[in-house]
Image (tube, helix red, strand yellow):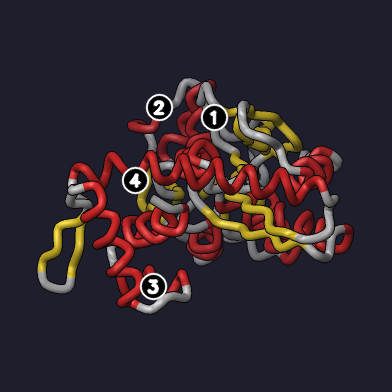
Amino acid sequence: MTLEQLRIFAAVAERQHITRAAATLNLTQAAVSASIAALENQHDVKLFDRVGRNIALTETGRLFLAEARAVLARAGAAQTALRDYAGLKHGRLAVHASQTIASYYLPRLIVEFHRQHPGFTVDLAIGNTAQVAKAVAEGAAELGFVEGPLDAPSLHVEPVTGERMAVVVAPSHPWAKGGELTNADLRRQAWVFREEGSGTREAFLAALQERGIAQEQLNIILTLPSNEAVREAVAEGAGAACLSPLVCGRTLTAGALKQANILLPPRPFQAVRHKERYVPKAAAAFLDLARATPPFIA
């Protein structure tokens, strides 16, 4: 069994498609099929069920995927360690982050990191808190950044900066006048929320819970999959929403949104890394940039 076979198996398993995996790996479809067949024949197992042009992991394949990912992660860590011995000259840093952080916080850090280390490429992927934690735990990412609470024994979680979220409404909304809001006001209001699993959603629900308001008491009329969709729906008068100031700051300045008179608690932006894995110099340097960022709290 070779690392190349494991790499091909993992790519096919993650995409459930030989042609797409071959394109990603820059290999021919025949080469990918032959590698999978050789792996199955060498060990007398069936890793995929084939139905027409479609494939799906067998139970054996699902169990083996976790082992394959772990071996590939260890091999990647060993390669990174050797590269580090030559200094921060060139390489790749894999970072996974939640949507708000990936879209509005990390780009400026990535630009600065590239200025300091032009030979390095930062590969940024977006997921919710659970997905980011899983990527770091499995070695798919060397660093993760999340807003939501995280309890994972294998991971080191470190607050690096923070923000205070804002409740925003359209300029024509009664809350735009700045009057103090009661819990009854919050319960009656039509709300636009992010999807379940969103760090912004979880942080806002936790803040409301501290005020004695449960999710079941809220009038959530829209659930949307991105910060931008929520922001635009509110600007069109759909209702109120809770958003990061990084998301709505320019819109507030332009007057297209107004901030309601409710003070929410600060929430941290947290860096996530594996407790036991080698921390590459590139990851350490990127973390230093993150730690130097002042909080976005008014």
User: Label 4 sits on what residue type?
Assistant: Leu
Residue 26, placed above or below residue 116: below
Q: Give the residue at mark 2.
A: 214
Using the rendered view, name the quadrant where residue 178 is placed: top right
Whichever of labels 3 and 2 marks the residue nearer the N terminus, that label is 3
Whichever of labels 1 and 3 marks the residue nearer the N terminus, that label is 3
Whichever of labels 4 and 3 marks the residue nearer the N terminus, that label is 3
Q: Position of residue 130 (x, y in %)?
A: 46, 39
- Callouts 1 and 4 close, C-beta under 8 Å: no
**How far separated are the C-alphas under marks 1 and 2?**
18 Å
Position of residue 4 in the picture relative to residue 106 (left or right):
left
**How far separated are the C-alphas under marks 1 and 3?**
37 Å
Q: Give the residue at mark 1.
A: 149
Residue at (54, 25) in percent of width and height: 154
**How far separated are the C-alphas under marks 1 and 4?**
28 Å
User: Label 3 sits on what residue type?
Assistant: Ala
Residue at (28, 39) in percent of width and height: 63
Q: Position of residue 121 (x, y in %)?
A: 71, 63
- Callouts 3 and 2 close, C-beta under 8 Å: no
Q: Nearer the viewer, mark 1 or mark 3?
A: 3
Using the rendered view, name the quadrant where residue 18 is placed: bottom left
Give the farthest residue toward the right.
116
Q: Nearer the viewer, mark 1 or mark 2?
A: 1
Q: Residues within 10 Å of mark 3 (few under 14, many from 20)?
A: some
**How far separated are the C-alphas under marks 4 and 3?**
18 Å
Q: Give the residue at mark 4.
A: 65
- Callouts 4 and 3 close, C-beta under 8 Å: no
Q: How many marks?
A: 4
Q: Position of residue 225 (x, y in %)?
A: 43, 57
Q: Nearer the viewer, residue 277 or 210?
A: 277
Residue at (31, 42) in percent of width and height: 64
Residue 22's tag is 3
